[in-house]
Image (cartoon, rainbow, N blue to C red):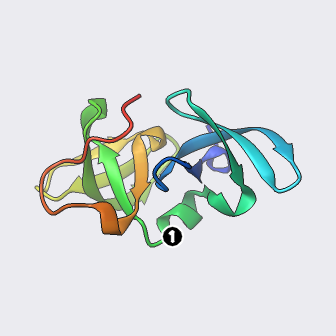
Amino acid sequence: MGFQDLNWARWSQDGNLYFATVTAVSGNTLSIQYYDGSEDEVDRSDFFNLIEAMNSGMKPLGNWQGQGTFYPIELGPIGEDGVMVRYEDGTEEVLPYEWLVFWQTNTISGGGGNVIRQG
């Protein structure tokens, strides 16, 4: 997977950004398939590459060890296969890009994990 394939789209059900692939384009509307297989249609303004998602002002969450529970993270160096992340407890791991979610900051509660759209 090249960096040009790293994209996130705003899911209409909760407003958060999830890893996504464009399946069709009609004007300014993009048909999207998310990593978990669900589909949606979004406006082009709700589709972000990695840098745009990182600069969106939304809080990045990581799918800890791919187990379906998401925790707030700090993003570190990015590479071809994933991004180094640090969780609030100091734990670090390289996460595949598909396991990153960008969450609306006003919806995160303090401490503990956030279970969201498990795929």
As displayed, is residue 11 above or below residue 46?
Answer: above
Q: Which residue is mark 1?
A: 56
User: In the image, residue 34 lies at what x, y percent?
Assistant: 57, 36
Task: Give the number of callouts.
Answer: 1
Relative placement, left or right, of 8 versus 77 is: right
Relative placement, left or right, of 119 versus 93 is: right
As displayed, is residue 23 above or below residue 111?
Answer: above
User: In the image, residue 69 lies at what x, y percent?
Assistant: 25, 38
As displayed, is residue 37 above or below residue 86?
Answer: above
State the quadrant of the C terminus.
top left
User: In the image, residue 50 lies at what x, y percent?
Assistant: 56, 57
| Label 1: few (<14), some (14–19) or many (≥20) C-alpha neighbours in 10 Å | some
Image point (48%, 65%), residue name: 54
Instruction: Please tell me which residue lies in front, 92 or 103.
Output: 103
Relative placement, left or right, of 25 versus 40 is: right
The residue most toward the front is: 13
Amino acid type, mark 1 = Ser
Image point (15%, 63%), residue name: 110
User: In the image, residue 1 lies at what x, y percent?
Assistant: 61, 37
Image point (27%, 61%), residue name: 108
* SS at mark 1 in the image: loop
As displayed, is residue 92 above or below residue 98?
Answer: below
Relative placement, left or right, of 107 versus 28 is: left
Image point (76%, 47%), residue name: 30
